[in-house]
Amino acid sequence: MKVGVLALQGAFSLHEQVLNRLGVAAVQVRTPEELAEVDRLVIPGGESTTISKLLEANHLGDPLADRLDDGLPVLGTCAGLILLATAVMDGYEDQRCFGGVDMTVRRNGYGRQSDSFTVPLRIHEWEIPFPGVFIRAPVVESVGEGVEVLAVLDRVPVMCRQNSVVVSSFHPELATDDRVHRWFIEQDWST
Ligand code: GLN
């Protein structure tokens, strides 16, 4: 399996490191050709406004939308969640939303960089809490009916799934815990 990490801006190398630790061949994606070859894709944290612009500048916007339509499994974290939402509040006017998960999100809803925090999260049915690292994280304001909420913080969704698209407002690549990546890699998303 070839797992791509969108490498236009942001925390892509940390995702690569986690994937490498899991024994998965992770490749950086910067071109439509590279995107066409991957079986899974991670969209990292960073600055969603910048990543959105760079996606268009690199002619990746429409190919990414097409691959999402075709059911490409995608993990989006923080800025990645924003890009995969259906609507974004407090974004730039021309910021692109790919709509992989039916949700409305508010950029920087958890505050500024100095308001960063780590909190144990109950994900899915996992027994052991996962350390959720929040950095200028987006707040999920609402989710549509087809969305499975996998984790909440104070009743607000912080990890969700719709079909083969998984998003988190926190940064699993910053935790010394690879369960989110492992689950994303090992899951059979075709069923
Ligand atoms: N605030 C950033 C954005 O709007 C996301 C922050 C992050 O990815 N750590 O894109």
Image (spheres, helix red, strand yellow):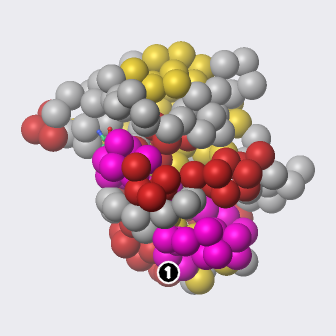
Residue on which disc 1 sits = 20
Which residue is depicted at the point 39% across and 21% down?
A: 89
In-front residue for pair 153/140: 140
Q: Is residue 47 magenta?
A: yes
Q: Position of residue 73 (x, y in %)?
A: 70, 55
The extreme right residue here reads 191
Residue at screen point 43% across, 33% down? 94
Q: At x 59% / y 20%, what residue is drawn? A: 143
At numbered mark 1, what does the secondary structure look like: helix, strand or loop? helix
Report if residue 186 is visible in the image. Answer: yes
Q: Position of residue 185 (x, y in %)?
A: 66, 65
The x and y percentages for residue 85 are 55, 33
Q: Is mark 1 within 8 Å of ligand 1?
A: no
Tell which quarter ligand 1 is in.
top left
* Magenta span contains residue 77: no
In the image, the segment drawn in magenta is: 27-52
Rendering quarter of residue 13 = bottom left
Residue flagged by tag 1: what amino acid is it? Asn
Q: Observer-nearest residue: 52 or 137?
A: 52
**Splitting the image into 4 quarters, where does residue 17 fall?**
bottom left
- Kindly tell me whether residue 172 is visible in this rendering: no
Q: Quadrant of the N terminus?
A: bottom right
Q: Using the image, determine if residue 26 lies above or below residue 162.
A: below
Up the image or down, 65 lies above or below 7; here it is above
163 or 132: nearer the viewer: 163
